[in-house]
């Protein structure tokens, strides 16, 4: 497969670094001023830190600014962080709040344009262009995924199929009958599509489908290997969050080695989540974004709770915008068991490292006699099913050892019948915590 | 001279065995014999049925994981020492039994021992050479 051709919409991806920094600095000054002038919370925070927009004299001065966190969005529900009047807001999205109120995000006409542009650049980064047929299986609605991908794909000139999430058999019919060349959905839902297509006797390898734009949940390289081995596609990791804009904050290029951040619009920093100090490039820490061009809802140093590092080495694709490492861990997903911090992605990587396992799994936490118990449930597949008890017990042990080696705790492994773990049409629920809080 | 055996993965939970049998019954498939291996968490249901391809698809359509394995069926006299004689041959031939089960249904004075070996072909030739009667699916299902 060839590398992707240059697409004119991607010009900003290749800006000389000096010029890029100038653009960022100019936009940073404007956005800080805008946030200070129009958003009470930002003004109060900056006043308390004795910082005024005039203190931003260089790009590095961004580290003087106070952070914004998710609860700030909840506390100001619904419209408290808007910097535009509702008259200028043309779109609202909201996250499904698992606890309490959702968070609401807003876009002006210009914001929607920027969002569309970064999505066009995202698709171009995956080698898509006019003439591609894109099946958009992200949910349409309050979730940003559906409409974000939709407008970008249309602007790219591709043919968009706005199928939204769910109705798996119909998804597969469309995939096959419409000559779809690219699909957007969560990686866990795509796994479900692979599985279902197999049951329907359809080999995805025979279809023209060649790219998957997968995001909205963390997934591992092992998962990517499985997806790419089962299909003829390249599986690209796309990153985004509603608070910043939605999908299109960053995405992988052909080389699939880190995600390019569209940093002319979203300025990335990595901080130590304990000391809150910036960490040097290459070091892991919490990803923080400042939106450089958003009007309706600027975000100043928003703490994403995602763990990543900035990769500042040049990418072979030639893009000058920096990359971040893939996000395999999200602070919010972390659970603590017997005093050990565990991320579901670690369990996933361990599981997939064992040959023959398929990525349908679930982690169940329980508490017995005051002690935390962790059980990893894995579906048995025809690949690793054995008619011998010994064969299955060996497999259980291998999975258990792999988990213990990776996370340092012993986990019980339970083999379960196929289709017993709930399939998700959006973000997969990997952890069931039945411990008493 | 080998028999195709179906193995089905079952979670060790109430109702799981029944639903597998119900699926077969619904398709009009009769089970000649079966054995159930169980552990605390899961079980493996091993089945010998005449229409094994059909049974496999029925079970798979019902959501099961099914594996087809070649097993060796031998016929022995249904009397004390009948099985011991076969086991002696197996021992002497250096064959390792993964598992086995037996049945006598409709065999008059004979019993059938079903063995799972790693190498079914080698086992068939060694058993036959030692004069043990290895029976194929025709004899098994049609009584010759």
Image (tube, helix red, strand yellow):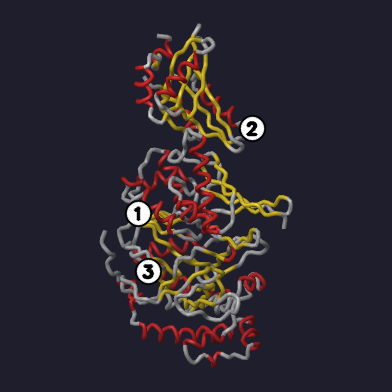
Q: Quadrant of residue A198?
A: top left
Determine whether, in the image, residue A149 is placed left or right of residue A370.
left
| Coordinates of residue A90 in the picture (x, y in percent) | 52, 70
| Coordinates of residue A361 in the picture (x, y in percent) | 53, 49
Task: Please name whichever residue, A394 or B105, is drawn nearer the observer in this view of the structure.
Answer: A394
Decide: few, some or many residues near mark 3? Use Cα within 10 Å; few <14, some 14-19, many ≥20: many
Marks 3, 1: nearer the viewer: 1
| Coordinates of residue A426 in the picture (x, y in percent) | 52, 54
Determine whether, in the image, residue A24 is placed left or right of residue A52.
left
| Residue occupying image coordinates x 50% and y 48% | A398
Chain of the residue on which disc 1 is drawn: A
- In the picture, the disc for residue A233 is 1
Disc 1 element: loop
- In the picture, the disc for residue A54 is none
Chain of the residue on which disc 3 is drawn: A
Q: Which residue is mark 3?
A: A121
Decide: few, some or many residues near mark 1? Use Cα within 10 Å; few <14, some 14-19, many ≥20: many
| Residue occupying image coordinates x 57% and y 44% | A414
Task: Please name whichever residue, A365 or B119, is drawn nearer the observer in this view of the structure.
Answer: B119
């Amino acid at each position: 497969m060839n590398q992707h051709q240059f697409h004119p919409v991607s010009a900003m991806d290749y800006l000389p670094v000096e010029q890029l920094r100038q653009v960022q600095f100019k936009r940073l000054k404007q956005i800080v001023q805008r946030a200070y002038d129009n958003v009470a919370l930002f003004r109060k925070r900056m006043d308390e830190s004795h910082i005024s927009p005039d203190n931003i004299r260089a790009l590095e001065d961004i580290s003087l600014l106070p952070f914004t966190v998710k609860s700030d969005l909840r506390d100001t529900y619904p419209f408290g962080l808007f910097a535009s009047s509702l008259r200028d807001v043309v779109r609202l999205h909201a996250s499904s709040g698992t606890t309490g109120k959702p968070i609401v995000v807003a876009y002006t006409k210009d914001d929607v344009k920027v969002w569309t542009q970064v999505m066009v650049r995202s698709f171009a980064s995956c080698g898509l262009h006019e003439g591609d047929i894109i099946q958009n299986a992200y949910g349409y609605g309050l979730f940003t995924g559906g409409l974000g991908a939709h407008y970008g794909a249309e602007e790219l000139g591709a043919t968009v199929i706005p199928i939204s999430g769910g109705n798996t058999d119909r998804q597969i019919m469309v995939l096959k009958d419409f000559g779809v060349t690219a699909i957007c959905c969560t990686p866990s839902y795509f796994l479900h599509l692979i599985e279902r297509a197999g049951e329907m006797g359809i080999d995805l390898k025979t279809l023209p489908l060649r790219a998957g734009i997968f995001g909205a949940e963390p997934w591992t390289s092992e998962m990517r290997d499985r997806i790419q081995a089962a299909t003829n596609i390249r599986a690209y990791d796309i990153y985004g969050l509603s608070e910043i804009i939605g999908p299109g904050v960053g995405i992988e290029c052909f080389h699939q080695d880190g995600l390019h951040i569209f940093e002319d619009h979203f300025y990335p920093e990595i901080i130590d989540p304990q000391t809150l100090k910036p960490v040097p490039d290459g070091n892991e820490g919490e990803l923080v974004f400042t939106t450089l061009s958003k009007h309706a809802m600027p975000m100043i140093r928003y703490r994403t709770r995602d763990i990543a590092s900035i990769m500042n080495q040049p990418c072979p694709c030639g893009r000058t915008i920096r990359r971040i490492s893939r996000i395999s861990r999200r602070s919010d997903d972390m659970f603590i068991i017997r005093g050990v911090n565990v991320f579901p992605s670690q369990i996933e990587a361990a599981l997939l490292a064992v040959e023959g396992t398929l990525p349908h799994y679930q982690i169940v936490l329980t508490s017995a006699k005051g002690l935390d118990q962790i059980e990893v449930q894995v579906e048995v597949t025809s690949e690793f099913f054995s008619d011998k008890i010994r064969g299955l017990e060996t497999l259980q042990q291998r999975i258990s050892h792999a988990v213990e080696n990776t996370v340092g705790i012993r986990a019980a492994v339970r083999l379960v019948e196929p289709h017993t773990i709930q399939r998700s049409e959006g973000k997969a629920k990997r952890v069931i915590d039945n411990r008493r809080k | 001279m080998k028999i195709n055996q179906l193995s089905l993965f079952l979670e060790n939970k109430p109702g799981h065995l029944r639903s597998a049998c119900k699926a077969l019954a619904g398709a009009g498939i009769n089970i000649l014999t079966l054995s159930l291996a169980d552990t605390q968490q899961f079980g493996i249901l091993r089945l010998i049925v005449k229409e094994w391809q059909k049974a496999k698809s029925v079970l798979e359509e019902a959501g099961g994981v099914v594996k087809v394995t070649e097993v060796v069926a031998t016929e022995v006299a249904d009397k004390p020492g009948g099985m011991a004689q076969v086991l002696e041959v197996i021992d002497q031939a250096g064959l390792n039994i993964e598992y086995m089960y037996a049945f006598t249904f409709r065999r008059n004075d004979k019993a059938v021992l079903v063995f799972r070996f790693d190498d079914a072909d080698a086992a068939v030739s060694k058993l036959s050479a030692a004069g043990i009667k290895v029976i194929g699916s025709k004899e098994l299902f049609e009584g010759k």
